[in-house]
Image (cartoon, grey):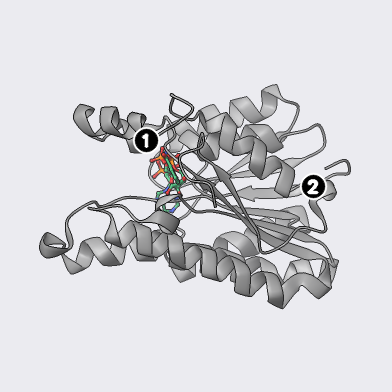
Amino acid sequence: MSEKRVVVVTGASRGIGRAIAAALARPGHDIIVNYHSSPDAAKETAAAVSDRGGSAYLHGFNVSDPESVREAFKRILNDHGRIDVLVNNAGITRDNLVALMKPTEWDEVLDTNLKGAFLCSQAVVRPMMRQRYGRIVNVTSVVGVIGNAGQCNYSAAKAGLLGLTRALARELVSRNITVNAVAPGFIQTDMTLRLPEKTRESLLEQIPAGRYGAPEDVAAAVDFLASDAAGYITGQVIHVNGGMFMG
Ligand SMILES: NC(=O)c1ccc[n+]([C@@H]2O[C@H](COP(=O)([O-])OP(=O)(O)OC[C@H]3O[C@@H](n4cnc5c(N)ncnc54)[C@H](OP(=O)(O)O)[C@@H]3O)[C@@H](O)[C@H]2O)c1
């Protein structure tokens, strides 16, 4: 991205979202740092954006709540005049075996990881069509492709995100708007730190690179898909997983 761009990153208070916000920061770029429950962590993201010469703007809203999303994007458009890049990164896990999974655990994961991406995409589609320019990047997961026991809700949401990516890519391609996905493998963040040590060790054995990924590994792929250079790429998935799955 060379000219001034307005970039929205959901779930940017921590982990992968923070690294994406920092990677997309450039002098002259406005980076909207969305958070839900961690305003203090979001301030650290804002500092990382400023360190790279970007301008950070904190916006707390819940991506799964239609009214908050509508209000937030209305305000962003009002304040910044346009939205060039949307990164749908916010995500949660509520792991359980299907036999034990509560309907609320299913709903929370689908609402945040899939409906959230739909609501935020819907909010930017019209302005991007008017601009005849846009980049939407969805952060899905390797388990949306290969599945994972104990994560039926999360795998379903992430697989759904791939369907959303491809269908929306077809809707918008003629307007110079691309929609792509990045599918991380296992990345060192709070989300994977929560896993039991034994699970973390056995997961490591499945990664040919011999290490967990860093948030910056994912951010680099998002930065490329969000760039002008990626303008002829749409409906695609870049896997960032140390060789764990080769699609
Ligand atoms: N870590 C991995 O190995 C891995 C692998 C594949 C895919 N991913 C995906 O990558 C994305 C980021 O994961 P991560 O590992 O960085 O997770 P994380 O460290 O747990 O951070 C999750 C982020 O999502 C935000 N969030 C959660 N619910 C939200 C909501 N309702 N509205 C707005 N923001 C919300 C959180 O904000 P607050 O803290 O402010 O609430 C936080 O910034 C997720 O979509 C995840 O599924 C991660």
Q: Give the secondary structure at mark 1.
A: loop
**Residue linked to disc 2:** 5
Residue at 61% across, 62% down: 73
**Residue linked to disc 1:** 206
Q: Quadrant of ligand 1?
A: top left
Q: Give the secondary structure at mark 2.
A: loop
**Furthest residue toward right:** 3
Q: Amino acid at mark 2?
A: Arg
10 versus 104 height, above or below: above
Which mark is in front, 2 or 1?
A: 1
Quarter holding the N terminus is top right
Q: Nearer the viewer, residue 122 or 176?
A: 176
- Residue at mark 2 to residue at mark 1: CA–CA distance: 38 Å
Residue 178 lies in quadrant:
bottom right
208 versus 120 height, above or below: above
Q: Position of residue 128 (x, y in %)?
A: 76, 66
Residue 18 lies in quadrant:
top right
Q: Amino acid at mark 1?
A: Gln
Residue at 43% across, 28% down: 212
Q: Nearer the viewer, residue 98 or 58?
A: 98
Q: Nearer the viewer, residue 235 or 137?
A: 235
134 versus 42 height, above or below: below
